[in-house]
Image (cartoon, rainbow, N blue to C red):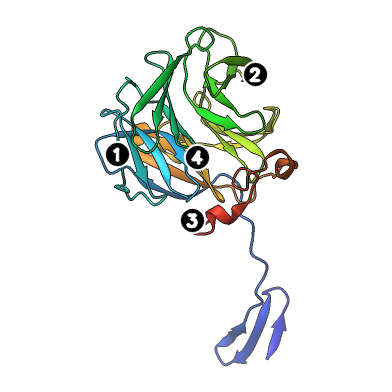
Amino acid sequence: MIHSPSLKGWFRVVAGGLVALSFPVGPTLAVEPGTPSGGFPWNSSELPVGLEALPDGTLLVTEYVTDSIVHMTMTGQEILDAPFPCTPSDTVNPESVLRLDDLLYVTDPEQGQLDVYDAVTCTYQESFDLSTNVVVATGITYQESTDHLLIVDPDFTGRPSKFREYTRQGTFVASHTIGSDFGRGVTFDATRCSYWLYTANNDRVTQLDMSFNSISFFRGPIFWGFQGGAGVAVVGGRLFVASPGSHRVMGFDIAEAVVQEGCNQIFGDGFESGDLSAWSAAGP
């Protein structure tokens, strides 16, 4: 029996040559952020657009065509539990959805407003006019440090894309520049103390810090042979991007993405603070 450093293993010498006996087991290699992982085809005539991750690791998805909101597992199985699927009655074009407590916030770029529904019954509550400060309302997420909403505005007038900050009661607070790219879907990632933003004109998923500065990015659905993306959501170590034109929700590994410091101090309610216990049954 001989050991070969060049072949990295132990071998036995036989008449026909060498027979491998064993190879050392090396460390598991980290998966580069942005590597496709998971995802699922959209098995309907609808187009998946907005994504929202719930604490149990499932997803809310807004659909074009019937303009409804459906409840899905992260492997693509529809969950039929009241009130889903539901059709937000006062929303013409549900681009994105955010659940906070017992409310659903739905952006409606067609009417230039943010519509609010009861999350238990899908009953319409009220609408906030966004037309004064928002050119087009695409993605939406929550900033728990201020208890405010952040709405993505690609701002087609030639100015850079913005986060438009609003209170939960619909009062405009401020605008935050997030670059010149066509921002669409966004989500807050409490585990990594970051925001993830999909920009349509360059097919990028960009990780932003708490001041909305770019930390890193990876290529989106178009790079992998699909059509452009829309809504984004994070479940544990995986980020999902809806690709309406391809009837698909793509998954990307982000387990090794940069973790910013400070979330455990800034966010204090367990789920938003980066406590992963809520994801324990959801998988990687």
Q: How far, Cα to Cα, is label 1 from label 2?
A: 34 Å
Dot 1 or dot 2: first in sequence order is 1
The amino acid type found where label 3 is placed reads Ala
Between the C-alphas of marks 2 and 4, the distance is: 21 Å
Mark 1 or 3: the one toward you = 1
* In the image: residue 40, left or right of residue 163: left
Q: Mark 1 points at which residue?
A: 85
Residue 66 shows in this picture = yes
Coordinates of residue 105 in the picture (x, y in percent): 45, 28
Categorize mark 4 by other alpha carbons within 10 Å: few (<14), some (14-19), many (20+): many
Which mark is first along the chain, 3 or 1? 1
Mark 1 vs mark 4, foreground winner is 1
Q: Mark 2 points at which residue?
A: 176
Looking at the image, do the residues carrying marks 1 and 2 touch, with CB atoms under 8 Å apart?
A: no
Nearer the N terminus, badge 3 or badge 4? 4
Q: Is residue 230 visible?
A: no
Disc 3 target residue: 282
In the rendering, which numbered label is found on residue 233?
4
Find out whether the residues at labels 1 and 3 contact each other: C-beta distance under 8 Å: no
Q: Alpha-carbon distance for marks 1 and 3?
A: 21 Å
Percent x, y of residue 145: 67, 32
Q: Which of 81 and 276 is in front in this view?
A: 81
Which picture quadrant has residue 94? top left
